[in-house]
Amino acid sequence: MKVKVLFFAIYKELAGTSKIELEIPENTNGNGLLEILETKFPELKKLRNVGKLAVNLNYVPLETVLSNGDEIAFIAPVSGG
């Protein structure tokens, strides 16, 4: 199945791109997608436990199973002040 992955902030810097389209196996969840992305972009391993996953504009747990055509975003934590 095909998904679109968007990278923001530090994710964009480490991946060297703001978006990609990717073929992934059926029943891949957010954790599985992260593993695939970390193979393509090893620098992303640095952010393994700090960001949030959004699917189709909604924050979801990494255990969420993805669907064909999903738009996935990895969003880095932010701080204000």
Image: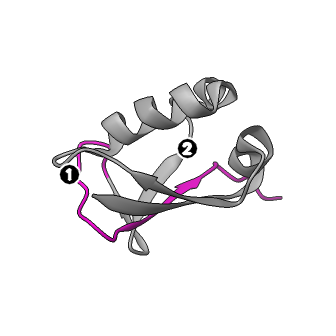
Q: Are marks 2 and 1 in contact (CB under 8 Å)?
A: no
Q: In the rendered image, which residue does mark 2 sit on?
A: 51
Residue 16, image x, y percentages: 78, 46
Which residue sits furthest left?
27
Side of 33 where 5 appears, left or right: right
Q: Is residue 5 above or below residue 51?
A: below
The residue that mark 1 highlights is: 65
- Which sits in the foreground, 41 or 52? 41
Q: Which residues are magenta?
A: 61-81
Of residue 9 and residue 22, the one placed in the foreground of this image is 22
Secondary structure under the numbered disc 2 in the rendered image: loop
* Crowd around label 1: few <14 · some 14–19 · many ≥20 (10 Å): some
Q: Residue at x 80, y 45 (%)?
A: 13
In the image, residue 6 lies at what x, y percent?
A: 58, 61
Q: Amino acid at mark 1?
A: Val
2 or 1: tag closer to the N-terminus? 2
Residue at 27 percent across and 58 percent down: it is 1
